[in-house]
Image: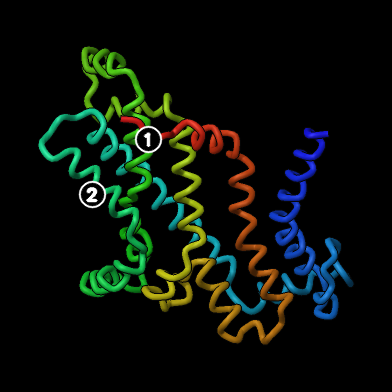
Amino acid sequence: MSRFLRYFLLLLAAASFIYPFIWMVSASLSSERGLSSLTVFPVEFTWSNYGSVFSKIPLGRAFLNSVLVAVVTTTLVLISGAMAGYALARLRFRGRDLIFYLIIFTMTLPFQITLIPNYITMVKLGWVDTYFALIVPFVLNSLSILLFRQAFTSMPQALIDAARLDGCGELRIIFQILFPNILPTVLTITILTFMGLWNEALWPLIVIRDEPTMTMPQLVTLFSVGGRAEGQLGVKIAAAVMLAVPIVILYLFFQRHFIRSMASSGLKD
């Protein structure tokens, strides 16, 4: 009975989390009159909501922009985070612990605090309405540095020493020797970074005004609140579904590695 009750409560919790997304997909395939129903199946099934989205905004170009920004930035985050994390974990230099604590401290600061200084910097550099404004401010990521540092700390020093004896440089040790041994951590950072960049709408709204350069979250936000949807709730929901689908697919592919890494990446010294 206790096991049955436990699984029943878990099923209720899972249903409460997944039902809003199922309803969102169902509502995007329903007519405007059917949106008042909270059923899990479409009412008066139609594809017109998705057709309206593509006819009113350049969603394909925005999708490619989001993919470009997310992939390039995530790659740079992995490279910079791995090098900084390795230095904080394995190299001995004065002020190392202070730098590490300062990096942890920056994780407690909300992004809005640096919003105005970052925008002024983009204006001074002439990067407004360019991809640089969407990529450069996110290249250094405190969470990635922290996770890499913890992963490298848990690796045996003998492995690094053996690589040095074989003539490997520090970069080769990081990316050819250590990377394959911390794959769950790498995938976790990849997923978290990609998800954060894909869903970022506030910063693009500030630095991008040229529609061909807009990302998908920015364009969907402007579409929903800017009047192009013409008050059609089903069209807005369809745009939101298309924004969420790539993240869901990404997580489904890598969830096993993601869960394993989050369970094993405790803060160890």
Which amino acid type is shown beneath numbered disc 1?
Leu
Q: Say left or right for 138 vs 48.
A: left
Q: Is residue 1 left or right of residue 237?
A: right
SS at mark 2 in the image: helix
Give x and y (percent) for residue 218.
50, 71
Disc 2 packing (10 Å; few <14; some 14–19; many ≥20): few
- Visual colour scheme: rainbow
Screen quadrant of the C terminus: top left
Residue shown at 21% from the left, 12% from the top: 165
Vertical placement of 27 versus 187: above or below?
below
Residue 246 drawn above or below residue 133: above
| Circle number at residue 204 | none
Q: Amino acid at mark 2?
A: Leu
The residue at the point 28 percent across, 14 percent down is 158
Report which residue position mark 2 lands on. Answer: 102
Q: Position of residue 5 (x, y in %)?
A: 79, 40
Q: Residue beneath label 1, please? A: 267
Which residue is at the front of the view, 182 or 151? Answer: 151
Q: Quadrant of residue 237?
A: bottom right
Residue 251 screen position, x and y as percent: 59, 45
Question: Residue 15, how many percent across, how many down?
Answer: 75, 52
User: N-terminal of the two: label 2 or label 1?
Assistant: 2
Q: Secondary structure at mark 1?
A: loop
Q: Splitting the image into 4 quarters, where does residue 29 fall?
A: bottom right
Residue at (50% x, 58% y) in the render: 198
